[in-house]
Image (tube, coloured by chain):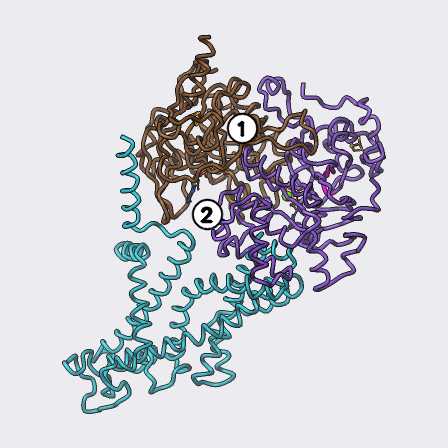
Amino acid sequence: MSTSSPILTVRDLCIDLFTARSALRPVDQVSYSVAAGETLAIVGESGSGKTVLNFAPLGLMPLGVSIHVSGSIRFDDKELVGMNDEALRKLRGGSIGVIFQDPMSALNPARTIRRQIAEVAELHLSLTSTQAEARALDLLKMVRMSDPEARLRQYPHELSGGLRQRVMIAIAIAAEPKLLIADEPTTALDVTVQAQIISLLKDLQKRLNMAMVLITHDMGVVAGIASRLAVMYAGRVMEYGPVQTVLTAPRHPYTMGLIDAIPRAEDLPGSAFRGLPGMPPVLGPPIPGCAFVERCRHAVATCETTRPLLAPTADRHVLAACPIVNRSSEALHAG
Amino acid sequence: MKFLRAFLSTLAGMPKVAVGAVAIFLFLGIFAPWLTPHDPNAQDLLQANQDMSISHWLGTDHLGRDTLSRLIAAARTSVVGMSLVLILALSVGVTIGTIAGYRRGWVEEGLMRIVDVGLAMPSLIVALAVIGIFGTGYWNMILALALAWWPGSARISRAVAVNVMNRPHIESLRVLGASPLRIYFKHLLPTTLGAVLVYATADAGAVALAIATLSFLGLGIQPPTPEWGQMLVDALPYLEASPRQVILPGLALTAVVIGFNLLGEAVALNRVPTPLSAKILRKRQLTAALWTREAA
Amino acid sequence: MPADTALLKVENLVTRFKSVERGKWVKAVDGVSIHLNPGEIVGLVGESGCGKSTLGRSIVGLEKPQSGRVLLDGVDLGTLSGRKLRETRRAIQYVFQDPYASLNDRQTIGEAITEALIIHGVSDHTEQRRRILELLDQVGLPAVLAERYPRELSGGQRQRVAIARSLAVEPRVLICDEPVSALDLSIRAQVMNLFLTLQKELGVACLFIAHDLALVRQAASRVYVMYLGKVIEGGGSLDVYARPGHPYTSALLASVPSADPRIEALREAPVLKGDVPSPTNPPSGCRFRTRCPQAMEICAVNEPATVALSSDHSAACVIAEQVHRGEVIAPKVH
Ligand SMILES: Nc1ncnc2c1ncn2[C@@H]1O[C@H](COP(=O)(O)OP(=O)(O)OP(=O)(O)O)[C@@H](O)[C@H]1O
Ligand SMILES: Nc1ncnc2c1ncn2[C@@H]1O[C@H](COP(=O)(O)OP(=O)(O)OP(=O)(O)O)[C@@H](O)[C@H]1O
Ligand code: SF4
Ligand code: SF4
Ligand SMILES: [Mg+2]
Ligand SMILES: [Mg+2]
């Protein structure tokens, strides 16, 4: 694990979302940090707030929603919470690169690839338009695009999913960001293309010494690229620690269930899939006790009422928000 | 200039003004017969070109007709004309557009070629040409404008319909084996119509302007029916003596056109997600503030 | 199993789209033949953009094939038209990838299912009511959801509703286009188990399109692999996964990431390099040759014939038998 001081430190971040229909808290006291050259993976239930957590503080929210952010996000010695829109706009696409969940809707269908990449370069590197277009070509080469000159003249809909995702990456790294946030960058891709994209991201990360936050559902991707893992459930971090430890020896009951649900080589065709019973809670006001209580095998009466906080487990590097399992593992160690 | 731009952008931010202008316009138009203080067509040459007074709030024109009454009655002419044009244009446009969107392939190609030809010609020129051929007259004007306007709504309807047809929920109906009539009338038409009506808001102002323009040129509403464009022409020779007679109909027309345009723009921009109103936002913030209190 | 008893049979299907390049065509599906036996789950995997969705959509009539036949119970759907076609084809239903878009957001769940029932000719109100409850129960949803709107449901619940609605017309085949890729792991397992139950209890056959190879392996008894518009391998899933006969399949299997970081740490560069060629101008001969580690000169000349590797396993590659026997050093994870 990297020992350098983190470039991104999130402390006790809470995000309240106000919509016309309700108020909800999709991010509830989340803390983590990422150092330069390091990758943090965020996994968790869909709707658990992964996207909101990463994009809302950067000012990227859909119309019709208002947010309230509290806590602290320190990026590169600047505080992002409370920063004005103008400054945030400079950061986005500048020293923070972003890759969205859906590449098709993030690209402008009416512009050539050349224009879309060049635009970002013009904006953030103050290049002239000719310089920027030369830079666009370099970037396409950097993301290992075959036949880059021809690709520059194409429109997004003419590219396959994998190529489109490479364009998104090229745009995201156009200004050589210090932090790259990638929201499910390979969900729509098959495994061979996914392998290429992941290896590309790793390579770029090494070259630019970027910090990276990667949101995904795929534990294989996590294992391949990340050094640290945060597991989210209903807006809260349930477990946080080195990937190696969390994936092979999960402590929190939710993480255990999640990892248990991964199909294994010994599962026979036609055999039932393992998973967790029940549904995640509908987000609303902060849940008073443990958010996972309804689906948890280990739940006891206090889980309903007392909110478990992230605390070090027997392995000091791993934090888990479950006193029950924590206690029994301590007991295990004592005994 | 700078002031004007700032003013306009504030207006855009506050569609309330637009809503107001359009609402007043529609209200006056609908209830005109009960609102006019005088008969808008009653001439009284002894009272010609009068200044504002108790009995004639906005004065009279060169034939002694009450200006306020004529302005209000003109609103009605405009509302009725505009509605007729839009109803005709939308019926034709939405029908053709949704059929093209539903029946892709050569039917679509053929229909859209016709629409493209229609779109290539400026609306007013089309209208002028039609009036040139069929002669002036109220219904000829309505017909001419409807002919000029339907291609626009056909194009939008087709775009909306194609989008709707490609949505998985329509595709899943097709897979379920729903009959074409069910898909067309129960799902495609209502959804498309809803979306197209929104775009039509922006067009309403342009139609009102076109009616006034044609009337100004003597090709639309014929005297003595009160109409803003025509009131302008009527008053022009007396511009110096009573500029108010020119300014008032001009202002009314401008307000309506800007009102509709702003409204159309605002509606198009905020179509699905409407920004939270200050009131709801405060309510939600309060809710959230209570969570923190409870937790503490 | 011989293809004669097949419930659904696709023969030489070709579906093409107009290309953005003038006058050219994208042959998204280029001569595909597959079959489905009654009550069988068959996987369909392959590169993104290789035509899996187009194949599925052509089978249910959402795309119009240029040539080829789709037979249901031996009846060529191409010979039917109008109402007869709609009623026959209703036996094949499609489950879409996006559980958020496949329901009309202005209909309640109950209304959506009722509409499917009406289409299917169930017009009696009490009977409709009974069927709705039965269908919701079949997919494991509480009856109260019938009054809700789609936006009030979670992704997993919506996908179940979409499945319940297709079941309303009593289908015999479900074509599932990445039905769980929008769902997270724990809900994914629940929906997958639902498919297994439907197959066992109702005998519904299922063509299961997915990117997740592990998922397909566990759910499907047979699997087809597509590359650039063609099926390049097909067979019993255990055999295909254990002993693939096509270099692309080997590469695909070797690319599946493992959830164990210790294995991933040993992973070398990606197995496959380069990009999928454009379907507008596919390579001559074998379509995989531009990326195949084993490509030879002959591969550029002739399209490789399909080689039978066992009674139900075949692959379209000149060296299929060697690959199958493991004689070709297939790219390995470590
Ligand atoms: N525009 C919005 N309006 C209302 N609620 C929203 C909006 N965007 C997000 N939410 C809510 O915020 C919560 C968190 O959503 P978010 O998109 O962050 O989830 P996620 O973890 O990224 O899920 P996924 O894995 O499906 O992408 C969800 O419960 C969602 O319902
Ligand atoms: N409506 C269309 N018009 C033009 N080309 C299309 C259309 N639909 C699909 N294609 C093209 O046909 C090819 C096959 O697409 P298809 O969606 O069937 O692939 P897929 O295997 O389902 O991919 P994925 O795994 O990414 O979903 C692609 O090259 C795609 O660009
Ligand atoms: S705190 Fe209780 S409910 Fe929550 S995960 Fe731990 S044991 Fe389960
Ligand atoms: S036919 Fe040749 S190029 Fe194609 S897969 Fe086989 S060895 Fe590779
Ligand atoms: Mg998300
Ligand atoms: Mg697809």
Residue B124's x, y, as percent? Answer: 46, 73
The numbered mark 1 sits on a residue in which chain?
A
Q: Secondary structure at mark 2?
A: helix
Image quadrant in which you'd find residue B231: bottom left
**Mark 2 lies on residue:** C152
Which residue does the image show at 59% across and 24% down from the upper left? C259
Q: Is residue B248 left or right of residue C109?
A: left
- Look at label 2 and name its amino acid: Glu
Please indicate whether residue B202 sits to the left or right of residue B115 in the image: left
Q: Colour of chain A?
A: brown
Magenta stretch, residue numbers: C224-229
Display colour for chain C: purple
Q: Quadrant of ligand 3?
A: top left
Q: Is C81 drawn above or below residue A102 in the view shown?
A: below
Q: Residue at image x 44%, y 30%? A: A293
Q: For mark 1, does the 10 Å Cα neighbourhood hold few (<14), some (14 to 19), or many (20 or more) residues? A: many
